[in-house]
Image (spheres, grey):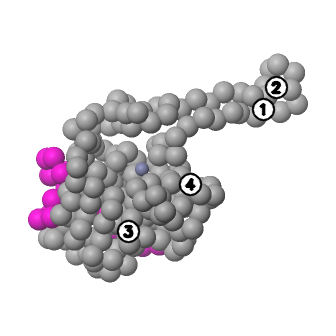
Amino acid sequence: MMVYPGNPEVVIELAQDIECGASSNVSKMSLGSHTGTHIDAPRHVFKEGEPIDKFALEAFFGPCKVFDATSEEKQVSLYFVESKEIQKGDRVLFKTKNSERGFETFRNDFVFLSGEASEYLAKKEISLVGIDYLSIKEKGSKDNRPHTEFLSRGIPILEGIDLSRVTEGEYVISAFPLKIEGADGALARAVLIED
Ligand SMILES: [Zn+2]
């Protein structure tokens, strides 16, 4: 599967194999903590930041707003987020052109959340932010606000979601990260449930 450049490749192989006489199949998995759909914890960008297992779980389940940002060319802009009804405590996901382009191969020009928009949403104290690519931040950019604005406030970032079959609207989200002690991030199974 596609991984962010420089991150570990995903390797899954059978460590015990019924076909080779074992009584059960057991796989050995090797992968990065920011693989596929995952949650970023403060420790991802802050040395002494809280790890994934210390997040309160409330943010990962409940009402959620999906905004169609497929009109945004390069980044989800401040102008775009300002025009939306977003309040304190909201869980907010952005569907961008990334979902339309698919996730077969990594592309450097993925749509990200702008630094200004990140600052605006973090100051609004939303409870969860999500975007449909492996990073919320522009590749190679010095503007770290898409990470730091949220994570310094303890707002989890959900990355790598596939919204190709999701339309704008309100849903219930369930996206609990795996509880891995001390981890800077963890895989999540994210689903949107229609009312
Ligand atoms: Zn990440």
Q: Spatial distance from mark 3 to mark 2, Cα to Cα?
A: 47 Å
Front residue of this view, candidates 21 and 107? 107
Q: Residue beneath label 3, please?
A: 152
Q: Earlier in the sequence, mark 3 or mark 2?
A: 2
**Range of magenta residues:** 62-80
**Residue under the image location 31 percent in, 52 percent down:** 136
Q: Earlier in the sequence, mark 1 or mark 4?
A: 1
Amino acid bearing label 3 = Ser
Does the stretch in magenta take in 33?
no
- Asked which secondary structure carries label 4, the reply is loop
Q: Spatial distance from mark 3 to mark 1, Cα to Cα?
A: 42 Å
Q: Spatial distance from mark 2 to mark 4, Cα to Cα?
A: 32 Å
Q: Residues within 10 Å of mark 3 (few under 14, many from 20)?
A: some
- Asked which secondary structure carries label 2, the reply is helix
Mark 3 or mark 1, whichever is nearer to me: 3
Amino acid bearing label 1 = Asn
Find out whether the residues at labels 3 and 2 contact each other: C-beta distance under 8 Å.
no
Q: Residue beneath label 2, please?
A: 18
Q: Residue beneath label 4, please?
A: 183
Q: Position of residue 108 (x, y in %)?
A: 25, 35
**Image-based side of 118 in relation to 34, left or right:** left
**Residue under the image location 71 percent in, 27 percent down:** 14
Quadrant containing the C terminus is bottom left
Q: Position of residue 12 (x, y in %)?
A: 62, 30
**Image-based side of 134 in relation to 70, left or right:** right
Q: Residues within 10 Å of mark 1 (few under 14, many from 20)?
A: few
Q: Quadrant of residue 76?
A: bottom left
Front residue of this view, candidates 77 and 149? 149
Amino acid bearing label 2 = Ile
